[in-house]
Amino acid sequence: AQRVTQPEKLLSVFKGAPVELKCNYSYSGSPELFWYVQYSRQRLQLLLRHISRESIKGFTADLNKGETSFHLKKPFAQEEDSAMYYCAQNNTDKLIFGTGTRLQVFP
Amino acid sequence: GAVVSQHPSWVICKSGTSVKIECRSLDFQATTMFWYRQFPKQSLMLMATSNEGSKATYEQGVEKDKFLINHASLTLSTLTVTSAHPEDSSFYICSATDYYRADEKLFFGSGTQLSVL
């Protein structure tokens, strides 16, 4: 079965520090991967998709097929980035989510 | 983005009662809706795929008689937790697909916290 793994449950950094939230997937074909974010008391929302290759709120994520990874990165974290981040993979039009990583950015 | 409304946001019920959760797409037609369940500090687990006008497709391990899904219109899907028990207490989230959008296609409701006493 396809799996999405986020090894870190919690990632704490200080404001201005670089951030990398790890995500690994298991799929031999061409995966479609996403990062979703859930801010405190808000609904889950799409942050970015690998096929769009864009930067949203300073975040980028590159698909590395050799390492089967889709890590989320931001060079300088901001306090407002504190949230739950979920990596997800499209599996025949169904989203399979990782367990999530809570990012805490301290001032 | 498109809006998905989920109601109620929080429900507390006695063991043995049934609870209905509604998921509505407010500004688009959703031929497909998904129901997820999330336990504390765990990920979202897909329960079922709901297609308008047809039977829902349940994921392995999800009891279809326990979690009744009805998708009678293009804007409404309901999840009924029948004869709820404390182990059914969880956070339930729906999502809906707007296939006509070129960018983001999947939108989430705000979730329903079910507490069974």
Image (cartoon, grey):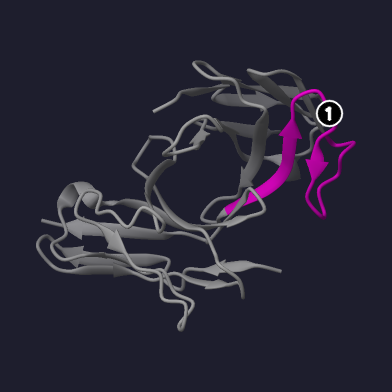
Q: Chain of mark 1?
A: B
- Pinpoint residue A28: horizontal percent, then vertical percent: 62, 75
Check the picture and name the quadrant holding the C terminus of chain A.
bottom left
The residue located at (55%, 55%) in the rendering is B43
Q: Is residue B46 magenta?
A: yes
Q: Which residue is mark 1?
A: B54
**Amino acid residing under circle 1:** Ser
In what element is the residue under mark 1? Answer: loop
Q: Is residue A58 above or below residue B52?
A: below
- Pinpoint residue A39: horizontal percent, then vertical percent: 34, 42
User: Which residue is the extreme one toward the bottom?
Assistant: A66
Q: Is residue A106 magenta?
A: no
**Quarter location, residue A4:** bottom right
Check the picture and name the quadrant holding the N terminus of chain A.
bottom right
Q: Is residue A68 above or below residue A48?
A: below
- Pinpoint residue A32: horizontal percent, then vertical percent: 52, 59
Please state which of residues B10 and A5 is positioned toward the viewer in this rendering.
A5
Please state which of residues B48 and A41 is positioned toward the viewer in this rendering.
B48
- Pinpoint residue A96: horizontal percent, then vertical percent: 60, 56
The residue located at (50%, 37%) in the rendering is B105
Q: Give the side of residue A51 with respect to residue A91, left or right.
A: left
Q: Is residue B90 above or below residue B101?
A: below
Q: Which residues are magenta?
A: B44-67
Q: How many marks?
A: 1
Please state which of residues B15 and B61 is positioned toward the viewer in this rendering.
B61
The residue located at (67%, 40%) in the rendering is B89
